[in-house]
Amino acid sequence: MNTSNNVSKTFKLALGAALLVSVSAMAATFAEADTNGDGKLSLEEAQKAGLSDLASNFKTLDLDKDGFLSKSELKANR
């Protein structure tokens, strides 16, 4: 059993859960933050919407590394 790998997975799950709770608690919803209506969030949109936890972990949450966060990426990080 790789303890380091298990700790890393646990940390990622905890981080994702904390971020989702944070995002849910904020007034800005995904749709409100998505100011250009393209169905995904850029780092700039997250910052402008005041989603600081999301913005500070943007690179980690951007699973496909396209520079945007989709709803499915946010769900995958629960």
Image (spheres, rainbow, N blue to C red):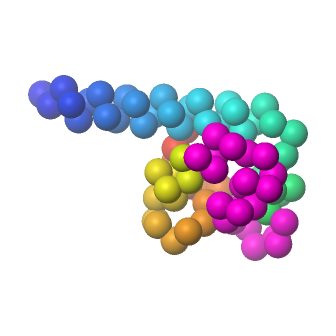
For residue 33, which quarter of the picture?
bottom right
**Which residue occupies 75% across, 73% down?**
38
Q: Nearer the viewer, residue 35 or 76?
A: 35
**Residue 15: x, y in percent?**
50, 33
Up-down relation of residue 63 to residue 22 (above or below) = below
Task: Count up the numbered dots.
Answer: 0
Please identify the quadrant where the N terminus is shown: top left
**Residue 64: x, y in percent?**
46, 65
Q: Nearer the viewer, residue 43 or 71?
A: 43
**Which residue occupies 49% across, 56% down?**
59
**Residue 21: x, y in percent?**
68, 31
In the figure, is residue 49 to the left or right of 42?
right
In the figure, is residue 65 to the left or right of 36?
left
Up-down relation of residue 60 to residue 69 (above or below) = above
In the figure, is residue 71 to the left or right of 28?
left
Q: Is residue 49 visible?
A: yes
**Which residue occupies 65% across, 61% down?**
43
Please identify the quadrant where the C terminus is shown: top right
Up-down relation of residue 70 to residue 3 (above or below) = below
Question: What residue occupies the far left of the structure in this picture?
Answer: 1
Q: Is residue 50 magenta?
A: yes
**Residue 61: x, y in percent?**
52, 51
The residue segment tinted magenta is 35-56
Q: Is residue 75 visible?
A: no
Q: Is residue 21 magenta?
A: no
For residue 67, which quarter of the picture?
bottom right
**Which residue occupies 70% across, 33% down?**
22
